[in-house]
Amino acid sequence: MKNTGPLASLERNEVRVLLVAARIIIRLGLRAALASTEGIVICGEAGTLADATREIMTSRPDAAIAGLHLPDGTGIDACRALHAQHASLRILVLVEAAAPGDLIGYLAAGAAGIVRETDNPESIADAIRRAARGEPVIPPTVMSAVLEWMQQGILPTQALPVDLLSNQKRKMLPLLAAGLSNHEIAASLYLSPNTVRAYTSEIYHALGLKRRAEVSAYLARIYDGR
């Protein structure tokens, strides 16, 4: 059976990328920045969400870079629609800056992570390759902001009762939502992988969840409703 998952592009030694942005100058800039990058092929582009969903059917991209402000939808709308149409598509949201709550919303909508408008071509190319390998793509400074956001207790306590989750487990939530492995979470929070594994099971049980993808959706519901 033909592999159409995140590793399919690596087997071909190339990553096919769809550019989705309302402004043509942004698409041209991304195309120019990645033109000479080995192993990355710009297979199509679209200026609207409707065009992007049609383009997926013909260009069959492995990854997409999607802008936030499309004529017919937001970046989150784009993530949801593209992910629903092509579940294995690795979507990177192009942002000027990323607030922690926004990042959780993107992840919940199916994004693999973000790239920033100020990133250099090498950083964008690296983000595309990491996304194609199935890795979450979240800059360390943004992840630090997410952790601080969680530590400050911005999520409403009535939606996330302290009697269910300890402060340490609350810190784990955005990391689980981002798809980090147990070893990556352990390194970020100075815990052992076994402790992270145990905490993860306790979090799932307390919140009625089964997998990491459900954590991002759970946090997005809290964020949207606060």
Image (cartoon, grey):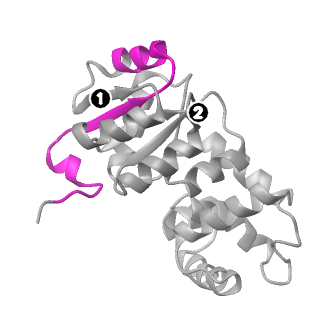
Residue 27 location, x and y as percent? 42, 20
Q: Secondary structure at mark 1?
A: strand
On the image, numbered disc 2 is attached to which residue?
68
Q: In the image, what residue occupies the spot 43% across and 52% down?
A: 83
Neighbourhood count class around disc 1 (C-alpha, 10 Å): few under 14, some 14–19, many 20 upward? some
Res 60 visible = no
Is 187 on the left or on the right of 8, as rendered? right
Q: Quadrant of the N terminus?
A: bottom left
Residue 68 location, x and y as percent? 58, 33
Q: Quadrant of the C terminus?
A: bottom right
Neighbourhood count class around disc 2 (C-alpha, 10 Å): few under 14, some 14–19, many 20 upward? many
Q: Secondary structure at mark 2?
A: loop
How far apart marks 1 and 2 lie (CA) works out to 18 Å
The one of 179 and 220 positioned closer to us in this rendering:
220
On the image, numbered disc 1 is attached to which residue?
44
Mark on residue 66?
A: none
Residue 191 location, x and y as percent? 63, 71
Q: Amino acid at mark 2?
A: Leu
Asked whether residue 30 is drawn in magenta, I would say yes
Q: Amino acid at mark 1?
A: Gly
Q: Which residues are magenta?
A: 3-32
The vertical placement of 120 against 130, above or below, is above
* Rendering quarter of residue 125: top left
Res 45 visible = yes
Residue 220 location, x and y as percent? 68, 59
